[in-house]
Image: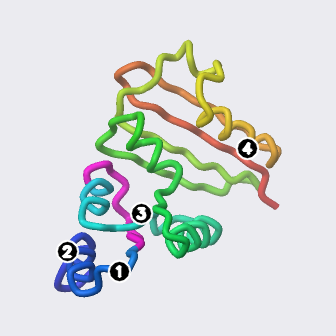
Amino acid sequence: MPYMNGVEMILHIRSRFPTVRVLMLTMAEDAPHIREALQAGAAGYILKSAGRDELEKALAAIAAGQPHISDSMLQELKHAQATHVWLDLQLKANILQLTYRDNGLGLDPTRLNQPTGNGLVNIRQQITLLNGNCVFASEAGQGTTVTISVPFA
């Protein structure tokens, strides 16, 4: 962005128009950028790589006065304490594959297959509805990798 970065733009907009709700649409995937944007007054935060559904969901939430952070970024902020998140999206032989990787705290591998919270359970349920596959790999202190594959025709 010419002349100022996204956070500076949020501060500028909010100082001139305090009631305007700002959705941060960015390529920055790491926790410090997310926190900085939210502290500057962003009402939402999504990646430029987000699909139309995610963008519509974010705009609807913000228009209704609710904050919105994409699910993967929210999990990273809440649990992983990661400083970086990497996303890779590929289409191979009619299989759409999304890989999420972070450098956070990781999970205890013995808990990955236990329904200890709604996050992992919901991800698995949603992928199953799409006839897909979801693989979690994590080690305490080593970050987490999630690979989701769904048929794409």
SS label for mark 2: helix
Q: For the residue marked with disc 4, what is the amino acid?
A: Ile
Q: Is residue 24 left or right of residue 58?
A: left
Kindly identify which residue carries mark 1. Answer: 19
Earlier-in-chain disc, 4 versus 1: 1
Q: Residue at the spot x=79%, y=51% of the render?
A: 151
Q: Secondary structure at mark 4?
A: helix
N-terminal of the pair, mark 2 or mark 4, is 2
Magenta-tinted stretch:
23-32
Residue annotated with mark 4: 127
Q: Is residue 29 magenta?
A: yes
Q: Alpha-carbon neighbours of circle 4 within 10 Å: few (<14), some, or many (≥20)?
A: some
Instruction: Give amino acid for label 2.
Output: Glu
- Quadrant hosting residue 59: bottom right
Q: What mark, if any, has residue 8 been given in the picture? A: 2
The mark nearer the N terminus, 3 or 4, is 3
Nearer the observer: mark 4 or 1; the answer is 1
Was residue 60 drawn as part of the magenta stretch in this picture?
no
Identify which residue, 15 or 127, lies in the foreground: 15
| Horizontal side of residue 87 vs 77, given as left or right | right
User: From mark 3 to mark 4, how far is it between C-alphas?
Assistant: 23 Å
The mark lying in front, picked from 3 and 1, is 1
Q: Nearer the viewer, mark 2 or mark 4?
A: 2
